[in-house]
Amino acid sequence: MILIIWLTIVKVGHVLGNETIGVIYPIPNWLVDGFLNGKKKVFCKFLVHDTTNLTLKNKVVFYASYGSKKLVGEGIIEGIEFLYPEEILAKYKEELFISEHQFTKYVSGRRKKKLLVLVLKNIVKYEDPITYNRPITMAGKYFTSADYEFFNKK
């Protein structure tokens, strides 16, 4: 009985566009151009846990923080890992969205903690950033296909 109810909820969620298809992560507005220049493809972020609900082919949408309140670009996830800072530099140093100096500063004091590593493809900087007045915390915000359609209509 419980399984039938759960399957019904999951199926209805998919039909109504309520399945998670990605996440919005904030980035400082002064880093937007470096993140979305099309030359780099690896985004790293500390999370509370070493788990994520993201899957391959989900989207990552970037939100310019510090007063901008705009969605500025996106990419599609083609790889997901949890790695220590040293492992990230060894494997992805040349492909990180931020410089080695910025990365070292970011991980300072947290070298024994793993980071979420997202390898992205089809990275696009929006020509016209999308105003998004909902709050986005440093943890990010998952979104559904219905949410994605809504903010892309603006």
Image: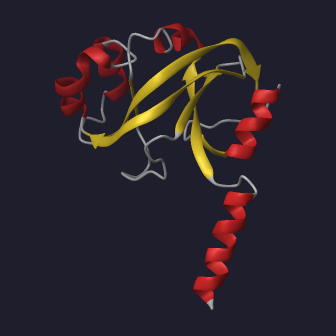
Quadrant position of the C terminus in the picture: top right
| x, y percent for residue 31 | 51, 12
Is residue 100 found left or right of 150 in the rendered image? left
Please, which colouring scheme is shown? secondary structure
Q: Quadrant of residue 59?
A: top right
Determine the residue located farthest toward the right in the rendered image: 154
Residue found farthest to the bottom = 1
Q: Residue at x 70, y 55 (%)?
A: 18
Taking the image as shown, residue 93 lies to the left or right of residue 138, namely left
Residue 64 visible in the snapshot: yes
Asked whether residue 114 is in view, the answer is no
Name the residue nearer the viewer: 40 or 65: 40
Please name the residue shown 75% across and 28% down the image: 152
Which of the 4 image quarters holds residue 74?
top right
Q: How many discs appear?
A: 0
In which quadrant will I find the N terminus?
bottom right
- Could you tell whether 8 is left or right of 51 in the image? right
Q: Is residue 3 above or below residue 27?
A: below
91 versus 2 height, above or below:
above
Q: Toward the viewer: 66 or 64?
A: 64
Q: Residue at x 72, y 59 (%)?
A: 15
Q: Position of residue 114 (x, y in %)?
A: 29, 42
Q: Residue at x 64, y 54 (%)?
A: 19
From the top left corner, tell me how far across and down residue 95 is, in percent: 31, 18
Q: In the image, residue 77 lies at what x, y percent? A: 44, 35
Relative vertical location of residue 8 with respect to residue 100 in this rendering, above or below: below
